[in-house]
Image: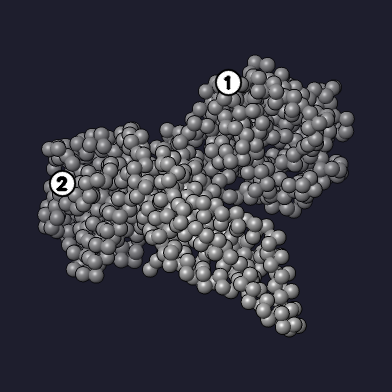
Amino acid sequence: MSSEEIEDMRRFDELAIVRLTGLSHLKLYDPETSECLMHEDEWPSFVECQDPEISILIPAYNKLGYTFNCLQSVKASCSEYDGKYEVIVVDDGSTDRTTWLLSRIRGLKLISSDENMGYVRSNNLGVREARGKHIVLLNNDTIVTSRWLEFLVRTFKEHSKVGAVGSKLIYPSGVLQEAGSIIWNDGTGWNYGRFDDPEKSEYQYVRDVDYCSAASLMVDRNFVRPLGIFDERFHPGYYEDTDLCFFIRSKGGRVLFQPKSVAIHFEGVSHGRDTSSGIKKYQVVNREKFVEKWKRALRIQYTSDPRNVLRARDRPGRKSILVFDHRMLEYDTNSGDLRMYSILQLLKSVSWNVTFYPASRECVEPYAFELRQRGIEVFGEKRPIEEFLVQRRDYYDIILLSRVRVAAEYIDAVTLWHPQSTLIVDFPDLESLRESRYAKLVNDDQKAAEAEKLSLKELDVARRADLVITITEAERRRLLERDQKLRVRVLPNIHDVIVDGLSFDERKDLLYIGGFEHPPNVDAVLFFVKEIFPLVRRSLPSIELLIVGSKMPDAIRNIQVAGVRVVGYVKDLAPLLSSCRVFVAPLRYGAGLKGKIGMAMAAGLPVVTSSTGAEGIETRGREVLLVGDSAEEFAKRVVQLYTDRNLWEILSRNAKSYAERRYSPHTVRQNLLRTLKEAHPVNLKERVCRILNDRMSVSDPLSSLLSIYYLRRDLRNAFPEAKEGDYRRLVHWAASNVEGIATIEKYREWYTNDPWTRIERLKEEVAKSNTKLQEEVAKLNRELKAINQSLIFKMLKRIARIADASFPDGTLRGDFRLAVIASLRVVSAQGWKFFLKQALYKLRRREFRVRR
């Protein structure tokens, strides 16, 4: 980017900057002038604090307009922290009216120096006067935004072993300046995301980074060194904040990037950006000092290569996993989303890099925000899946596809673009089993046929995966009965055990919890209210049923039955689980492990359910719940459990013990780690061959040429152990199985109409001195000259030669040149610019058409 463009991004525009801050009442002045001195009635004032939690430290050298605007924004942004923070400004020998201005701002702690000490020593002087538990280093050429300080503080509270948290830095124009930074193994730095859109998904989640700029950085006081916060070897400045972050990690702390804490940074106001002169030259000098000091730590850093940026943005040595699910995880509304949400948190707890990809592409709030604040990248842009997968090639160690419909939609693209990744398919339940049971319940032959199709789809994606995860042992056995070659592991729901709860005598009423966009829950409640509850009320006239859950349909919301209370959505279920006496789950169809039942068991709330509801709970002789399928039997079980204290206490104790052994986060974490450790690619070759057979029937010669040429390169990456001849044979097989030979005849037909053929046909006519034909020949000659001199034609000829060389002698040799020549017809019809754009589009996205 040119220096002029960067200057445009740094230009002061009050209205635009105020919009970026989200502080509508913020008043700013042109920082390159002294205009602020004329508006004393609008100067900020701070609340004096005797015992501050936070110390905001701002070094300043001249540039009073920038310092004033910075203080204005701090006051406006941090009003909810009044009385909890102090602001310290170190005036580093300013020669303008900075000292005069700062001395007149109430509540500000001013430290003045008679001489210019430089950035490092100014901060070290200021930090010795700071009293807060957390110290915020803030440049005077910044303007902080709404909730800037809140999110810095929040990150320390919500994450463990945090030593420092850095803000997202943006230019005054709104362009991203830095979203955490990378240090390469030679000590050079890379501002991640520089000049990009700051709202992109990849810049929206909390993550461990190499370092964050001290332009806006909160540091735990425990990591302040005896002589100050910065090592004075880096005096007067540059690499001091990088050294600080490496020091924090060496002492066991973490350095995190917090995207919701945003500061507008003018950048280079004090010292410019020329590294050959002035203070800026120390950027080069201090890098050598930094490399010498941290040479052992730098060994694990990535090499300075833009291709390494994606992996280097996270701390080195971590594994990465990409998780697909049907939508944003609304974990407080249904069991399936809660299970996946818990799995993602377990993966983060063992330091995996996690990307979550909702098939709906909708970042529903507050769920996306919660995931991102826990360090999980949530992809929300609505761009083609192929584009995303191409951008992330060679990044993911494991790709997990949850739910059969999601797996069926994405498995081909994932296999094609990430052949080196281990592919796992997760079934939260066997949907085909659930649907077949529903079809049987309502006696619907069409539903039964659809369930059978879904069953075949489940088996298909399971066979193409390297590992399959089911939620119960029963469903694992069911899959293995259909194909013994499958590799299947069980990973159940995850539930925290509730320690405290009321006693039997202190509890009352029945409880049902469910997410009502899941049809089995609607059916279960209606069945209970209409057929079971009247039988229960005959024996227990005063008993009530509480129906709790999200997204209730009118059929549930409008229930008007004595003793039935439709509660609706409840965020915190613990009080209900601890105060109700019996949990009921009369499910008539469904599949998998029922999250509602596991949740009740973990709370020690005894359960009455159906055989379907009890699936997956293997007690080995110890009774943990009661089962009843008919209305009469179910009602009898409810009354028995509700009135028998001894039975209730036995079931409560056994259920809680069972849940702790099977569903606790610790148990499932160990199970998950073993599963991922065992997972490795086993079905790679079969998956690739299937795609070749199903997807490579193309409709135009350029696509055919590019797809087969790039296929060979992908096969080389997928099968590094194979010999060169193996690639040729496989490519040849692909060409002969995707109508490659048949389309060659089309190429020959098109070839007869290209400019070279037409000009030969016209030579005889030209000899007859036909002026009109001579003009046409001249026009064709100009056309041929333009084609021959164009870069795109040279590129196409080169690709044609390489493609021909990929085949054994005598096999289709020369035919791909015909395909290139035929492509020229597209060029002449639509223009070179359009053609080049289309060629690059196809090349990047590998567009294939499925044969119908």
Give amino acid for label 1: Arg
Residue tagged 2: 626
x and y percentages locating residue 318 in the rendered image: 48, 33
Q: Nearer the viewer, residue 749 or 395?
A: 749
Q: Is residue 488 left or right of residue 685?
A: left
Q: Is residue 594 left or right of residue 141?
A: left
Q: Residue at x 58, y 74 (%)?
A: 753
Q: Secondary structure at mark 2?
A: strand
* The C terminus sits in image quarter: bottom left
Q: How many marks?
A: 2
Q: Nearer the viewer, residue 134 or 420?
A: 420
Q: Nearer the viewer, residue 747 or 759?
A: 759
Bin the neighbour count of mark 2 within 10 Å (Cα to Cα): few under 14, some 14-19, many 20 and up.
some
The disc label shown at residue 296, or none = 1
Whether residue 638 is visible to the viewer of this picture, yes or no, is no
The residues tagged by marks 2 and 1 sit, at their Cα atoms, a distance apart of 61 Å
x and y percentages locating residue 521 in the rendered image: 28, 57
Task: Decide which of tag 2 and tag 1 comes sooner along the chain.
Answer: 1
Q: Residue at x 65, y 48 (%)?
A: 196
Toward which corner of the image does residue 151 lie, by quadrant? Answer: top right
x and y percentages locating residue 426 in the rendered image: 33, 48
Give amino acid for label 2: Leu
Image vertical order of residue 292 relative to residue 193, above or below? above
Q: Residue at x 42, y 33 (%)?
A: 350
Q: Is residue 442 left or right of residue 284?
A: left
Q: Secondary structure at mark 1?
A: helix
